[in-house]
Image (spheres, grey):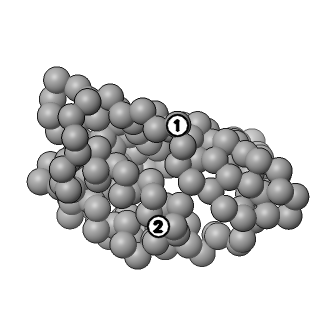
Amino acid sequence: MSTPTPSSPQDVFLRLVHGVCAQDYRALPELYAERTDVRHPMWPGGTPPLTSRDDLRRHFGAAAAANDGAVARFQPENIVVHETRDPEVIVAEFEYRGAVHATGEPFAIPCVFVMRVRDGQIVESRDYVDHLASARARGRLDHLIASLRASEPA
């Protein structure tokens, strides 16, 4: 693996995941191009693609609003970045690891991001996240299941 430069795909990825952990939701949209294509294929029930920086501002704004302090601390760990033949594209495997605030119970949320970074900005990303582990860590598993049941066809 080559040494990351300030605008390399690896560096942009690292700024993203560390920014998520720092809950720097206002700065995160600036890591993305004005026109982008971000998808969360494993989100239970599906979710529309995020195709603009404004979509990302709303997405991260919702994350900030939903932050209820359930997670005491978390950080990206076990990061492995795979370069591809395309210099704009990386595949990053990692986990968000931390502890539940109320109980101190540790958690791990496995993730794989496939990202295309051009001119130092994310133009495309597929973010594969274990959303069930995330909901469990935040004490929102029952809420997630209820919302899925509510969206089932009658």
Residue 43: numbered disc: none
Give the image location of residue 108, x and y in percent: 67, 42
Quarter of the image with the C terminus in it: top right
Taking 133 as reference, is 123 left or right? left
Q: Which residue is mark 1?
A: 78
What type is the residue that disc 2 sits on? Answer: Phe
Crowd tier of the residue under label 2, counting other residues whose Cα lies within 10 Å: few below 14, some 14–19, many 20 or above: many
Taking 75 as reference, is 52 left or right? left
Can residue 147 be seen from the camera position used here?
no
Point 40% across, 45% down: residue: 39
Crowd tier of the residue under label 1, counting other residues whose Cα lies within 10 Å: few below 14, some 14–19, many 20 or above: few
Depth order, front residue of 59/24: 24
Q: Which residue is mark 2?
A: 60
What type is the residue that disc 1 sits on? Answer: Asn
* Label 1 secondary element: strand
Does label 2 or label 1 sit earlier along the sequence?
2
Point 77% across, 47% down: residue: 106
Between marks 2 and 1 in the image, the one whose residue lies nearer the viewer:
1
Give the image location of residue 30, x and y in percent: 28, 68
Point 60% across, 75% down: residue: 65
Quarter of the image with the N terminus in it: top left
* Label 2 secondary element: helix
Can residue 119 be seen from the camera position used here?
yes
Point 71% across, 62% down: residue: 71
The residue most toward the front is 3
The answer to whether residue 54 is above or below residue 7 is below
